[in-house]
Image: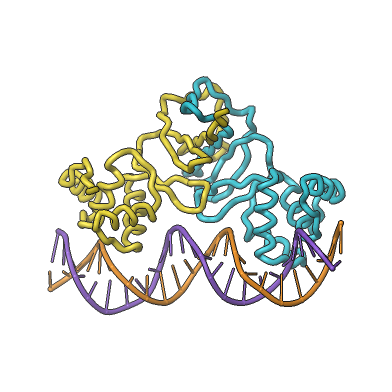
Chain colours: A cyan, B yellow, C purple, D orange
Amino acid sequence: MQIVPPVDRARLAESLAARGVRPTAQRLKIASLLLATPQHMTAEQIIATLKQAGTRVSKATVYNTLNLLAAHGFVRQVSSGDERALFDSNTHPHYHFHDLDGGSWSDVEESQVSFSRFPEPPPGFAVVGVDLTIRLRRLANK
Amino acid sequence: MQIVPPVDRARLAESLAARGVRPTAQRLKIASLLLATPQHMTAEQIIATLKQAGTRVSKATVYNTLNLLAAHGFVRQVSSGDERALFDSNTHPHYHFHDLDGGSWSDVEESQVSFSRFPEPPPGFAVVGVDLTIRLRRLANK
DNA sequence: TTCCTTGCAAAACTTTTGCATTAAA
DNA sequence: TTTAATGCAAAAGTTTTGCAAGGAA
């Protein structure tokens, strides 16, 4: 199995450069892998996937790159509830389903949720984001 | 400053025993500290607070106790978004404000939020919980 | 050249575990 | 006395950092 990310490397390189991020080979590999589809991956999964594809990128570089991509808004870091950080390639506003049995995450489009009542932020504060995670369990099929 | 938790130790001991949890001195100290008011603490904060009050409880015991209390529903573990786990002494259904500048967390009552649109879980799954975190930033006071 | 990035190993952190000792039922 | 909990240190797991070597501007 070969990895052929449907991401335009040239365009990606431009985006990175436009933010002052030097588009190195390693960064392009990591970014195009993660951005290939809307998905959620841990650093470890990225390292494993790259290795499987014959690309060896050091752990330090993967972590540094993920933090860098997150800092510039190319990916979003999600609190997995477990121990390790998840990186989400969908940077549009959206929410999550979290399958507590299988551990997997999937996206819920923003339009699928609306609030008829929502609290005012405390004085002096502004709302800058809303994280909504819907926890799921598999139904017992009897 | 001395710690005098407004928690009835005898009643707390009963609650623990009722769940088959042996109410040891260390467990009562940790639980009464955390349950004194609705609050959010890390394991490290609990260790530090106990130490400041002259009580020395081992790290292992604090972690074990927090996991035990969480398993029995006396506290709830929250994904802090940072690295370390937060333990929330408010076990009623509720949501959170998270001050990204100060790092502090506060509660939002369940009644403060309602949904006029909410997604169906995928087939074969049931919704077992909803985590909502409203991220805040301090307004620039010009 | 000069500055930035990579990779490796080691360090830092948080949390868990093994095991002898101690406390609770 | 029997079973379970504590404390210590060491282990485990994830993420960061220091630094020499390599690559881009």
On screen, B121 above or below A31? above
Q: Is residue B64 visible?
A: yes
The quarter of the picture where residue D22 lies is bottom right
On screen, B97 above or below B19? above
Residue under the image location 73 percent in, 62 percent down: A50
Q: Nearer the viewer, residue B121 or B92?
A: B92
Q: Position of residue B44 (x, y in %)?
A: 39, 55
Q: Nearer the viewer, residue A109 or B108?
A: B108
Residue under the image location 51 percent in, 24 percent down: B115
Where is the N terminus of chain A found, in terms of image quarters?
bottom right
Residue under the image location 58 percent in, 33 percent down: A128
Describe residue B117's horizontal placement relative to residue A93 as left or right: left
The quarter of the picture where residue D19 lies is bottom right
Q: Is residue A139 visible?
A: no
Describe residue C18's horizontal placement relative to residue A93 as left or right: left
The quarter of the picture where residue A97 lies is top right
Describe residue A134's horizontal placement relative to residue B93 as left or right: right
Q: Nearer the viewer, residue B119 or B79?
A: B79
Q: Position of residue B29 (x, y in %)?
A: 24, 52
